[in-house]
Image (spheres, rainbow, N blue to C red):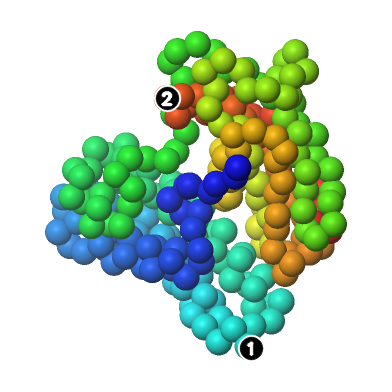
Amino acid sequence: MSTENDQFTIESSLLATKLTTLVTFSAATATVTKLGISAADNTELSGMVTPFVAAQAAMSNKNSITKTMTQTRDTAEAKAVAVARKFVKKWYYDNDADATDVLNADLAAHSDVRTSHEGAAIGMPTMDVEHQTGHRFSITIKDAAGSQGKPVNIVFIRVRYFVVSTGLTVPTDPADFCKFTDNSRHPIVLILPAAQAGLPIAISSCYVDAQGNEGPYSAVVNTNIS
């Protein structure tokens, strides 16, 4: 079973609405005064979200969507999400914004960003990635002993990936990859949209324990979507 449950890993039209609310609420005078949000950070957020929202709106007529439009939207979306993740961590979650502010900004009640693990150490997995037909990858995760089974206290195998559209650079830390899937067991199959065929992709993985903590990431595999 595979699920995507990051608060920004949602269907693009819903994401456009979410980010628009975040921009509007964060720029309100009362919010700026209360949370101390800097004008520069609000400007950066708006500057990334606006072109994404425009690109998504341009795709409202499904019969007129082209590959170029999809790639333009995906590039703008990845940039907007990268800035939004850092923005909400800094000004809402790390800033101890109260629950009302978090909800009014259309954010999840708890941060989805990685936290440090304070209990037993989480091991680093190894990862094998194989191309499959239909823009798919078959992914195999093994622990230090070479077993595909989940280690004790591990709930999910998290596979993060970053599609490199024009103008994007792969983040140094896999935790900053825009998309991820949580998998409870093998087989792990990553399916990409047909419109992304030919684009480079970076993939990495980690174990997630029962407390929601991420362990260290495997080596990043860089390849192309078939």
Give the secondary structure at mark 2.
loop
The residue depicted at 80 percent of the width and 40 percent of the height is: 129
**Left or right position of 105 against 137:** left
Give the secondary structure at mark 1.
helix
Which sits in the foreground, 135 or 197?
135
Residue that mark 1 sits on: 64
> Is 217 located above or below residue 22 in the figure?
above
* Amino acid residing under circle 2: Gln
Label 2 CA crowd tier, 10 Å (few <14, some 14–19, many 20+) = few
Q: Quadrant of residue 166?
A: bottom right
Q: Quadrant of residue 44?
A: bottom left
The residue depicted at 69 percent of the width and 64 percent of the height is: 193
Distance Cα–Cα, label 1 vs label 2: 45 Å
Q: Residue 37: x and y, percent?
A: 27, 51
The residue depicted at 23 percent of the width and 57 percent of the height is: 104
Label 1 CA crowd tier, 10 Å (few <14, some 14–19, many 20+) = few
Residue that mark 2 sits on: 211
Query: Contact (CB < 8 A) between labels 1 and 2?
Result: no
The residue depicted at 61 percent of the width and 65 percent of the height is: 75
**Left or right position of 67 against 91:** right
Which sits in the foreground, 25 or 138?
138
* Amino acid residing under circle 1: Ser
Q: Residue 84: x and y, percent?
A: 43, 54
> Is 156 located above or below residue 86 in the figure?
above
**Left or right position of 49 against 91:** right
Q: Quadrant of the C terminus?
A: bottom right
Residue 221, visible in the rendered structure: no
